[in-house]
Amino acid sequence: MKKDSDLHPNYHQIKVVMTDGTEFTTYSTYGNEGDTLTLDIDPTTHPAWTGGDQRLLDRGGRVARFKKKFEGIF
C-alpha cells in the first residue's frame, strides 16, 4: 500500500467549547493541533436533541390564514 502523508487527514487533539461555556478535549481532523472549535448549536441546548419547545413560526401569516380557513373543521 502506498505510504503517502497526504492520503489521510491529520488526526489531532482540539478543544470544543459548548454554548454554555463548558469545554472538553477530543480528537478531530478539524483545524490544527490545539485549535478551539466553538459551537453555535450543541446537543445540550438544541430542541432536536432535547425534545424541547416546538413552536410554529408564522411566516407571512400562513398559520393564521390556515387556522382561519379551517376553524370550523377542527
Image (cartoon, grey):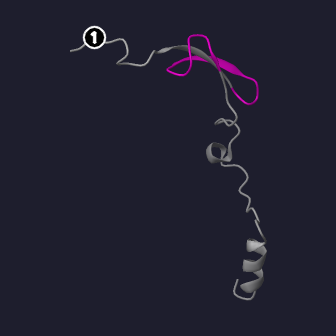
Q: Position of residue 55 (x, y in %)?
A: 74, 59
In the rendered image, the vertical position of residue 34 relative to residue 38, given as above or below? above
What residue occupies the far left of the structure in this picture?
1
Query: The residue under label 1 is which amino acid type?
Result: Lys
Residue underneath mark 1: 3
Q: Position of residue 11 (x, y in %)?
A: 46, 15
Residue 28 part of the magenta segment: yes
- The span picked out in magenta is 18-36
- Label 1 packing within 10 angstroms: few (<14), some (14-19), many (20+): few
User: In this orientation, which residue lies closer to the viewer: 60 or 45?
Assistant: 60
Q: Residue at x 34, y 18 (%)?
A: 7
On the rendered structure, is 12 left or right of 40?
left
Magenta: main secondary structure: loop
At mark 1, the secondary structure is loop
Q: Residue at x 61, y 11 (%)?
A: 34
Q: Position of residue 41 (x, y in %)?
A: 68, 37
Tell me the quadrant of the picture where the C terminus can be found. Answer: bottom right
The part of the image, by quadrant, that contains residue 31 is top right
